[in-house]
Image (spheres, rainbow, N blue to C red):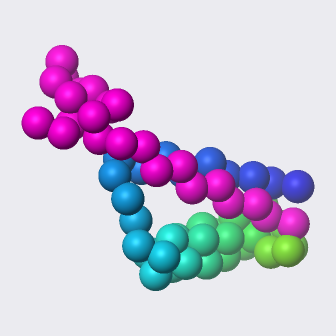
Amino acid sequence: MPYVNIRVAGKLSRKQKDKIVKGVTKVIAREAKKPESSILIFIDEDKRENIGSGGKLLDK
């Protein structure tokens, strides 16, 4: 059973999550030759204050 974990900085709308889940599921099913029903997608939304890049927090 394939699973995909997607981490994003900030929040996504329900509509955005729906589109991401549908699109990623189709790609994994096609490329890994797995049934769509076997694919799990996890979306983790992280606060920008908890992520740093280039020595700076993303919320600044």
Query: Can you say whether 41 is above or below 22 in the image?
Result: above
Answer whether residue 41 is visible to the viewer in this image. Answer: yes
In front: 35, or 45?
45
Q: Is residue 14 left or right of residue 42?
A: left
When the figure is inspected, residue 41 is found, relative to residue 58, above or below; the finding is below
Compared with 39, 42 (above or below) is above
- Give the residue at x 80% y 75%: 36
Most extreme residue toward the top is 55
What is the x, y in percent for residue 33?
A: 82, 67
- Residue 44 on the magenta span: yes
Position of residue 32 measured from the top left corner of the image (x, y, whole percent): 77, 61
Q: Residue visible at 75% across and 52% down?
A: 3
First to last magenta residue range = 38-60
Quarter holding the N terminus is: bottom right
Q: Quadrant of residue 21?
A: bottom right
Q: Position of residue 54 (x, y in %)?
A: 18, 23
Q: Is residue 53 left or right of residue 4?
A: left
Residue at horizontal 21 percent and vertical 36 percent from the top: 58
Q: Is residue 40 magenta?
A: yes
Residue 35: x, y in percent?
86, 73
Asked whether the viewer can see residue 31, the reply is no
At a point 32% along the width and 31% down the height, the residue shown is 51
- In this view, which residue lies farthest toward the left? 60
Q: Is residue 54 found left or right of 32 in the rendered image? A: left
Q: How many numbered badges does the structure rendering display?
A: 0
Q: Nearer the viewer, residue 50 or 23?
A: 50
